[in-house]
């Protein structure tokens, strides 16, 4: 009699845990309602890097990238946004767009500027990195599950 109760309790715990895992995976991300803003970034392009290499904006932001090439002609193309521009040495060009797609997008040089050209990349982060915190929560749940097992 007692044993069945214990088993039921155990099954209940695991069901609760499974429920939490599903919740973590499916819960809609509640991004704090940020008003779209005007964001301007000045990016220096030189062989073979961008400075800064990472841009973080909120979804809906109106983003202006001012690209400056310091040595040779460089370009900047954002994957997933279908945008491209090139800058002559010593000159700057501007690229304006609305960050209406969430996620992590790579940008890269679109002009062959030297032997390390393929490695000239950067990242545009639009919104929060949900994969990251979902992963962290799952790790926490796994830890909790481990502790429960220890009790039983
Ligand atoms: Cu380049």
Image (cartoon, helix red, strand yellow):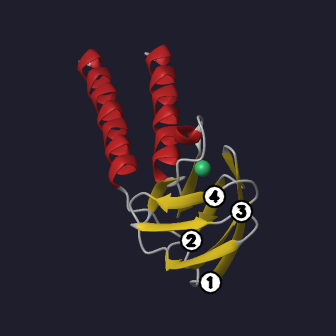
* Residue tagged 4: 73
Within 10 Å of disc 1 (Cα), the crowding (few <14, some 14-19, many 20+) is some
Q: Is residue 69 left or right of residue 34?
A: right
* Residue tagged 2: 58
Cα gap from disc 4 to disc 1, whole angstroms: 30 Å
Q: Please tell me whether residue 125 is drawn above or below residue 32 in the rendered image.
A: above
Q: Is residue 42 left or right of residue 79?
A: right
Cα gap from disc 2 to disc 4, whole angstroms: 30 Å
Where disc 2 sits, the SS reads: loop
Answer yes or no: do the residues labelled 3 and 4 have beta carbons within 8 Å? yes
Q: Look at the numbered disc 4 and say if its residue's Cβ is closer than 8 Å to ligand 1.
A: yes
Q: Look at the numbered disc 1 and say if its residue's Cβ is closer than 8 Å to ligand 1.
A: no
* Residue tagged 1: 37
x 45%, y 47%: residue: 131
Q: Position of residue 10 (x, y in %)?
A: 33, 25
Q: Is residue 97 left or right of residue 10?
A: right
Q: Which of label 2 and label 4 is nearer to you?
A: 4
* Residue tagged 3: 89
The image's mark for residue 101 is: none
x 76%, y 66%: residue: 90
Q: Position of residue 19 (x, y in %)?
A: 32, 44
Cα gap from disc 3 to disc 4, whole angstroms: 5 Å
Q: Which of label 2 and label 3 is nearer to you?
A: 3
Q: Please tell me whether residue 81 is drawn above or below residue 1 in the rendered image.
A: below
Q: Position of residue 3 (x, y in %)?
A: 28, 15
Q: Quadrant of the N terminus?
A: top left
Between residues 46 and 107, which one lies in front from this camera angle? 46
- Res 91 → quadrant: bottom right
């Amino acid at each position: 009699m007692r044993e069945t109760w214990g088993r039921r309790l155990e099954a209940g715990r695991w069901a609760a845990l499974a429920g939490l895992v599903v919740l973590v995976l499916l819960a809609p991300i509640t991004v704090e309602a940020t008003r779209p803003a005007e964001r301007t970034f000045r990016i220096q392009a030189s062989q073979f890097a961008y400075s800064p290499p990472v841009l973080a904006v909120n979804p809906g932001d109106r983003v202006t990238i001012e690209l400056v090439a310091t040595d040779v002609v460089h370009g900047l193309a954002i994957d997933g946004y279908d945008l491209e521009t090139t800058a002559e040495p010593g000159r700057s060009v501007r690229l304006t767009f609305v960050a209406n797609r969430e996620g992590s997008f790579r940008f890269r040089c679109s002009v062959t500027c030297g032997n390390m050209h393929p490695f000239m990349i950067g990242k545009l982060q639009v919104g929060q990195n949900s994969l990251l915190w979902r992963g962290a929560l799952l790790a926490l749940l796994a830890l909790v599950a481990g502790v429960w097992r220890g009790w039983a």
